[in-house]
Image (tube, helix red, strand yellow):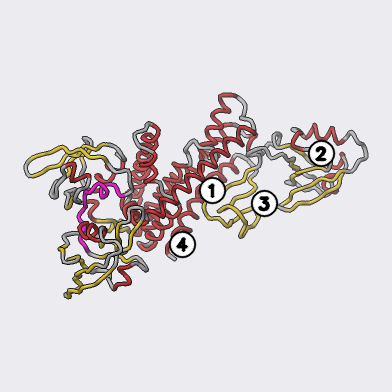
């Protein structure tokens, strides 16, 4: 249930904020906004205020603002219908959209003047007009003079059409959505610090390596337990948070790490893994005891009777020093019955459990997460505002930097597609992390929402047709050519963009399913 609640909250509020940006600037520019929907697909609930219908739709993976004239409507719109005018008596109302006229192909007619001239070629004729009004289709019979006392426009003529606005006005409307997502954390983070958020205490600790996994890239590179990391790629690091970000920035690339060992300083070179696990996947372990902090529902650990707070001291008779040794010993025992010696309060208990294989690696897991010491960050009203603004600014800068580096390395070939796909997450990842955030309390959920908001805003600016960034490219081309792209070109590029996004979504979902056990590492990165 927490996963569903968290996912709906995060996606719902971020889509609302994003679309609200488009909506506000469209209204401010005088554009006719026909629909404001949270979700896609079938309408679940809706109401109308003025000319706009507000909807909640079935598929909660996005939303949209439907503006008149976004892409060649092929209709005519009736406005300014006077009371007791011929148009009013015929049955027309302001806002009616003429979608068809019996005997005429409206797609080939570009102006009302042209259409009116054709209709008047048959004086006294009565035509059947097919009219859309508030999602209802009506038939109205009228003659050529039936529009007196009103104004009728084609999509290209309509002054409140999106396409009739200046390039600058359209650019503002498009950019407003992602911009709202980037601004939103500046509202959320002060609230987070007013409520108070617990963050892993080790992130502020001096980066001294506690454990190096056997045969790992870190061990091969020469890292040893007790090494104190002082610099990464010639940049000083003060704590584990700095180390994690440095590895994330170097995704798939060579990292030069300076460590202090005894009285000497050594430079060690390692490739930062292109995986969500980051430094842990390189084999470098943070300070973490083998104490159970959380049980995954229905997992082998819960079924065997393991409880939160249990300390695992031996596995099949082998002593366990820390969480990583424990995880390593369990990882090579998938589908094999193992014996755990556990300290619980003042007792020592022996428990048998069978690890299950996980993901593509097939390594064994029993469904436990570590107990982590935390630090509460809670401030007074004014300090919460200043600290929240600083935290939001850092979040925007850090995520922007990571995302641009990721794209740059892919484009330049420094990061292979096979490696890049390992860090792509989708809706299951968001749902999993949202559920974990809900369990951490409202402040943790809001913090996670701020992180996703920045990511959503930046990704929407990518120059991919269908996304806001693609529309920015269209406007740029239009400004250079001094005329818009043809409808055929728009349709082709948007279909390509749509197919690309669908493929990306399939890849993301596939990755989500195959790495459910590394989401906790992703969450910690931005704590």
Q: Quadrant of residue 142?
A: top right
Question: Disc 3 to disc 1, how far (Cα)?
Answer: 17 Å
In the image, residue 451 lies at what x, y percent? 39, 49
Q: Is residue 329 rendered to the left or right of residue 100?
A: left
Q: Is residue 505 rendered to the left or right of residue 34?
A: left
Question: Disc 4 to disc 1, how far (Cα)?
Answer: 23 Å
Work out which residue is located at the far top of the displayed protein and give it: 481
Q: Earlier in the sequence, mark 4 or mark 1?
A: 4
Q: Looking at the image, which residue is at 63% across and 49% down?
A: 35
Residue 420 or 16: which is nearer the viewer? Answer: 420
Mark nearer the viewer, 3 or 1: 1
Residue bearing mark 4: 4
In the image, residue 28 lies at what x, y percent? 59, 42
Label 3's element?
loop
Quadrant of the image for the N terminus?
bottom left
Q: Looking at the image, which residue is at 48% across and 58% down?
A: 8
Residue bearing mark 3: 50
Is residue 354 placed above or below 202 in the rendered structure? Answer: below
Neighbourhood count class around disc 2 (C-alpha, 10 Å): few under 14, some 14–19, many 20 upward: few
Is 281 in the magenta? yes
Residue bearing mark 2: 104
Residue bearing mark 1: 20
Question: Disc 1 to disc 2, how far (Cα)?
Answer: 38 Å
Is residue 379 placed above or below 272 in the rendered structure? Answer: below
């Amino acid at each position: 249930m927490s996963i569903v609640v968290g996912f709906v909250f995060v996606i719902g509020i971020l889509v609302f904020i994003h679309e609200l940006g488009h909506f506000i600037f469209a209204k401010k520019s005088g554009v006719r906004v026909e629909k404001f929907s949270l979700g896609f697909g079938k309408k679940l609930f809706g109401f109308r205020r003025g000319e706009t219908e507000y909807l909640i739709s079935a598929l909660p993976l996005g939303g949209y603002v439907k503006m008149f004239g976004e892409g060649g409507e092929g209709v005519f719109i009736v406005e300014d219908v006077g009371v007791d005018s011929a148009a009013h008596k015929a049955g027309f109302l302001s806002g009616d959209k003429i979608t068809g006229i019996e005997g005429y192909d409206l797609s080939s007619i570009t102006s009302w003047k042209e259409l009116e001239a054709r209709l008047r070629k048959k004086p006294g004729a009565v035509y059947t007009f097919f009219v859309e009004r508030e999602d209802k289709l009506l038939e109205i019979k009228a003659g050529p003079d039936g529009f007196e006392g009103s104004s009728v426009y084609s999509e290209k003529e309509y002054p409140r059409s999106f396409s009739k606005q200046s390039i600058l006005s359209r650019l503002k409307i498009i950019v407003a959505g992602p911009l709202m997502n980037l601004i939103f954390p500046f509202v959320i983070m002060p609230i987070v610090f007013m409520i108070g958020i617990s963050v892993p205490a080790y992130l502020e600790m001096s980066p001294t390596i506690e454990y190096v996994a056997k045969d790992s890239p870190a061990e091969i590179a020469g890292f040893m337990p007790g090494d104190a990391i002082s610099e990464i790629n010639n940049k000083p690091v003060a704590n584990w948070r700095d180390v994690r970000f440095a590895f994330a920035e170097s995704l798939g690339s060579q990292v030069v790490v300076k460590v202090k060992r005894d009285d000497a300083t050594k430079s060690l070179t390692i490739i930062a893994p292109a995986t969500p696990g980051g430094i842990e996947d390189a084999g470098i372990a943070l300070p973490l005891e083998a104490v159970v902090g959380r049980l995954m529902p229905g997992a082998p650990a819960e079924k065997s009777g393991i409880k939160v707070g249990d300390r695992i001291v031996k596995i099949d008779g082998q002593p366990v020093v820390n969480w990583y040794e424990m995880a390593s010993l369990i990882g090579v025992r998938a589908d094999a019955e193992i014996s755990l010696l556990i300290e619980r309060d003042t007792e020592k208990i022996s428990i048998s459990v069978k690890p299950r294989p996980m993901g593509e690696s097939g390594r064994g897991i029993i469904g436990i997460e570590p107990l982590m010491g935390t630090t509460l960050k809670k401030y007074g009203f004014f300090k919460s505002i200043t600290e929240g603004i600083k935290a939001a600014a850092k979040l925007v800068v850090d995520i922007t930097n990571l995302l641009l580096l990721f794209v740059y390395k892919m484009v330049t070939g420094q990061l292979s597609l096979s490696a890049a796909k390992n860090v792509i997450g989708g809706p299951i990842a968001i749902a999993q992390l949202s559920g974990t955030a809900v369990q951490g309390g409202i402040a943790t959920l809001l913090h996670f929402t701020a992180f996703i908001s920045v990511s959503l805003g930046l990704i929407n600016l990518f120059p991919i047709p269908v996304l806001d960034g693609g529309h920015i490219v269209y406007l740029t081309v239009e400004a250079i050519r001094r005329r818009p792209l043809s409808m055929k070109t728009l349709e082709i590029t948007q279909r390509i963009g749509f197919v690309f996004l669908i493929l990306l979504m399939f890849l993301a979902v596939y990755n989500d399913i195959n790495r459910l056990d590394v989401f906790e590492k992703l969450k910690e990165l931005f704590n």
